[in-house]
Image (cartoon, rainbow, N blue to C red):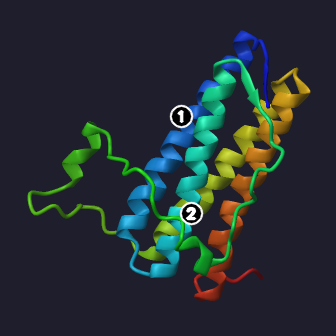
Amino acid sequence: MIANVTLSTKEKLLLQDQKSHEEQCILKYENYANLAVDSQLKAIFRNNCQKEREHLQTINQLLNGQVPSMAGQSQVNTNPSQQNQQQNQQPVAWPSSQQTAIDQSGKTGFNASDKDMCIDMINTEKYVSGTYDTTIFECKDASVRDVLNHIQKEEQKHGEAIFAYMQSKGMYSAQ
């Protein structure tokens, strides 16, 4: 069930920021899924990308004054074998200003390792999770806060999946 809400100007501005963050996460995850060498990492990036698309849809609903119910929402799946089943998402293109990084052979000038991409995405997820924290505290409606809290927890699960992958591959050691 979807409830209606009237957002303040500040809430709208914060949600616009969250929308921008979700769009950037989608871009990064989609492109990194295509650049990653390891198939397990590709699956993690694709799964996280799909969840980011759901977050974007939810943020758009909030911006339209609609609060979706979080009842029955699925949790982030960090099982790589099941992540491979979630690969039918729309491709995301780099903005035209960034296409100059692609040469005429179709290869990008960006040559990041799987580890580099993991580090970038963990840092991105940390940042995005923190911005959700601020937005949650600034929203007056409890149902909006609940929706944003749900998204924030999923963002943390994205980072957890990447962390677990890195740790399993010897890319990161919690000391």
Q: Amino acid at mark 1?
A: Ser
Q: Amino acid at mark 2?
A: Asn
* Residue 41 in picture, x, y percent from top left: 51, 75
Camera-nearest residue between 124 and 139: 139
Q: Quadrant of residue 65?
A: top right
Please, is residue 29 above or below residue 127 in the view?
below
Q: Residue at x 73, y 45 (%)?
A: 151
Camera-nearest residue between 99 and 75: 75
Q: Which residue is mark 1?
A: 20
Q: Determine the residue located farthest toward the right in the rendered image.
A: 142
State the SS at label 2: helix
Q: Which mark is residue 56?
A: none
Q: Quadrant of residue 167?
A: bottom right
Q: Earlier in the sequence, mark 1 or mark 2?
A: 1
In this rendering, would 6 be left or right of 21? right
Please, is residue 150 above or below residue 147 in the view?
below
Q: Residue at x 50, y 63 (%)?
A: 46
In this rendering, would 137 be left or right of 55? right
Q: Are marks 1 and 2 in contact (CB under 8 Å)?
A: no
Is residue 19 visible in this depiction of the protein? Answer: yes
Camera-nearest residue between 72 and 34: 72
Q: Quadrant of the N terminus?
A: top right
State the SS at label 1: helix
Q: Residues within 10 Å of mark 1 (few under 14, many from 20)?
A: some
* Whole-number angstrom distance, CA of label 1 to CA of label 2: 19 Å
* Residue 116 in picture, x, y percent from top left: 47, 70
Q: How many marks?
A: 2
Q: Which residue is mark 2?
A: 47
Q: Determine the residue located farthest toward the front in the rendered image.
A: 1
**Circle 1 or circle 2, nearest the eye:** 2
Please, is residue 70 above or below residue 12 in the view?
below
Is residue 124 visible in this depiction of the protein? Answer: no
